[in-house]
Amino acid sequence: MPVVALIPLLLLATPALASDGLPLMRSMEAGMASDGEELSVSMQLVQADGRAEARTFRMWTLTQAGKANKSLIRFDAPSSISGTALLMVQRPDSRPDNWLYVPALNQVRRIAPQDGTDSFVGSQFTIEDMTVSVNPEARVYTVLGDVPCGDGRTCTQIEDKPANDQAARISGYGRVVLYIDAERFVAHRIDFYDKAGALLKVMTAKGLVPVGERWRFDSATVTEVATGASTIMTVTGRKNGGVDDSLFSPSTLDAG
């Protein structure tokens, strides 16, 4: 779930329990589908003492039934990271393929699965956060119950955790708990826990708006529990349709 949805996004469970949460996760995944969207996004990196650093990027997404989900992020400002690009391609029921272009190095590199835990351009988001997708081969999805999630709405808590040792090794989290609106198929909140079981950070979303027949958030904030530092991403512009599939190619990431 990536920021794509603004964003997106785990108790031991039997296979029967795992299937409980999968249908809702699939519904949320379908709710994030689009024939093409282009977003303009502002990013604020806010320290616990209030100091802030501003960044801006554009994001393109293309999701088609039965085909790969594709997203591209390209930074416009500040000048120190302008042109930096992250390409994410998620094929059905498989691990995502990700590529990063860093202008200062003039290099496009494929991101190894274990590198997904790295911070995304110094923010509280990691590359893993930006590329989360539904994968029942590697993840276990368990319904925990229903809870209020603001604005008079009720959300279903889904616990998402690695299904095997390999999935656990490449994830930066022991488990993740999503608060999913079962009517609008969006996550209002995501809690991220470290591998020792402690709450690591919390993502909250707001500004829910209709986009065609689907729903999107216009703002997402991730806050680190230990430091109080946060990253706020806000959609400042949105266009639907007209996204060319050729945009999502590793060979053109350095084209600017």
Image (tube, rainbow, N blue to C red):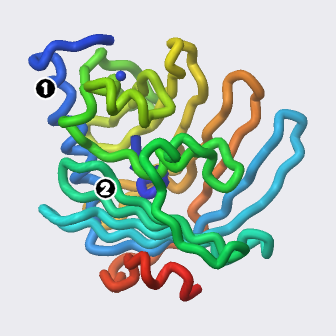
Which residue is drawn at the image coordinates 47% and 51% (left, top)?
A: 130
Q: Identity of the amino acid at label 1?
A: Ser
Q: Residues within 10 Å of mark 1 (few under 14, many from 20)?
A: some
Which residue is denoted by mark 1 in the rendering? 19
Residue 36 tag number: none
Label 2 sits on a secondary structure element that is loop
Tell me the residue that label 2 is attached to.
Answer: 32
Q: What's the CA distance linking mark 2 and mark 1? A: 20 Å
Relative to 161, does residue 131 appear above or below in the rendering? below
Closer-to-camera residue (74/96): 96
Residue beneath the point at 35% across and 28% down: 155
Image quadrant assignment for residue 26: top left
Residue 19 lies, with reference to residue 212, above or below; the image says above
Q: Are marks 2 and 1 in contact (CB under 8 Å)?
A: no
Residue sitting at 24 percent across and 64 percent down? 68
Q: Say whether residue 156 is visible.
A: no
Relative to 50, is 78 above or below? below
* Residue type (three-letter) at the residue carrying disc 2: Met
